[in-house]
Amino acid sequence: MLPDRRQQILLPVRLSTIVVSFAVALLVNFLPWYNVALAPDFVALTLTFWCVRQPQLIGLGVAWMLGLLTDVGNGVLLGQHALSYSVLAFCAVTLSRRVLWFGLWGQTAHVAVLLLIAQAVGTVVRLAAGAEFPGWTLAIGPLGGALLWPLVSVLLLAPQRGPREVDDTRPI
Amino acid sequence: MEHTPPAFFNRGPAPVVRLTFFALLSLALIVLDARFRYTEGLRGALALVTQPFQIVAAAPAAALRRAADFFASQSQLSAENVGLRTQLAEAKLAAQRLEAAAAEGARLKLLMGAAERLPGKAAPAEILYSGRDPFARRVLVDKGTRDGVRPGSPVVDESGVLGQVTRVHALLAEVTLLTDKDQAIPVQVVRNGLRAVAFGGGTSGLLELRYLAANAEIVNGDRLVTSGIDGVYPPGLPVATVTRVERDATNIFARVLCQPAAGVDRGRIVLLLTPVEAPSSPQQAEGAAEKGRDKPATKNRRQRAKEVRAP
């Protein structure tokens, strides 16, 4: 049984789609945000999406590399995002069979928890390294990111949706 | 013989094993970076990948700003021009006075046989955006190694010290503001020459003078300038104004809070100065340390070591 019976059968994912989506997410993350604590983490969101949809292809290795790139690009402690993205990817891969049984808003709730866990891991690492707690605004970014989940799902699945069915007699 | 699944079912190590591996790898990197700073080479290599993204991401904002500058209205420009002229006249007057004082000071120094410090060069830079780290107070400016910026350079604006360059990329430099929790600057009270070290107050946006005796002679409104004994900041730059002094009988240190003089949260144009040469020989270092009569010499050395390690 498919998670959602009305669901369209998707074409196999192309690797180029994944690569381009990660590149765009990195680009959006590096935009000069006014307050980075309030901005959603698009790389984490895209990573969660692919870990849930393609757990065979995208997993902890990719997450770790992306985390390292984010660390260097943001100029933060090296390994901070690598660790939090690894934990995020692990949770997402583990939950991947469960999450897709829910509707878009049920999935959003799951993703909110995942993103909050990732942010919490990063925060604990920084506090352990001697940084000062910047306040609970840190939770706004992950929650905002989770709210973007339906949009991201539709956008990233678009290349896999085949052309609109014209021939009604075709079996699938 | 062992039972192994056919290759078709082989999915590599279990997720928990992978998580343990990558978590340990990350923790090792974190420790290497936070405690020993061994990872600058890796950072440089990975920066080659992230730099194009950063340049492309910064382009729209830069173009927008340039367009805004281009379309600035005539009246706005003329009003700004008048304001700048007035400021220039005042600055010229102050500069003339300062020149006379500097000449006199140089003569006196020559008489005393003190080593003359060359005035550093200053390069203007524009603040592009605040750093992408909510745990630290940093800004990025549009000058990098290509423009000869060196890590450790003091950064000032028109009203005082703003911070210090802590990391330099090819086209950008990261400036850690004075208010960052890990940033420290040696200062001196203008009124009586009392030396102290000002530490960043983090999110409060203030500076704090630590390890100042409870009976130290410091009052509200005292102005603090750089003392110059760290070999990084040139002496005499305005740093902060004391806004609150708390003396507690149970504590041997006074709690002194100060408001930074420079606009650490505002302003766009800053000046990057070349760091003053640190005293190279131990004798010189001793001489510099001896000048600090209120602070033990070890404090100054530790301070200097911290400053050197900071970039």
Image (spheres, rainbow, N blue to C red):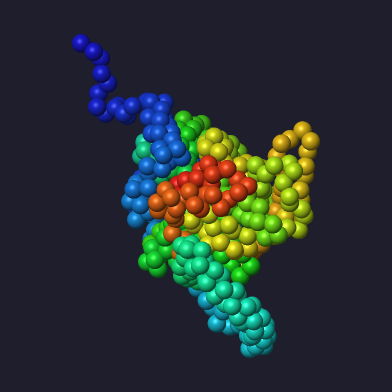
**Residue B113 percent coordinates (x, y):** 47, 63
Estimate the x, y position of residue A54 in percent, counting from the top left: 40, 40
Instruction: Name which residue lies at 70% across and 39% down.
Output: B253
Give residue A102's position: percent from left, percent from top.
56, 36
- Quadrant, the N terminus of chain B: top left
- Report the front residue among B184 and A10: B184
Instruction: Name the residue: 53% across, 47% down.
Output: B300
Whether residue A124 sits left or right of residue B16 in the image: it is right
Q: In the shown orientation, is residue B49 left or right of residue B286? A: left
The answer to whether residue B92 is seen in the rendering is yes
Figure quadrant of residue A110: top right
Q: Residue at x 55, y 38 (%)?
A: A130
Residue A155 vertical placement versus A89 (above, below) = below
Q: Nearer the viewer, residue B51 or B11?
A: B51
Q: Position of residue A72 (x, y in %)?
A: 42, 50
Q: Is B206 left, or right, of B268 in this rendering? A: right
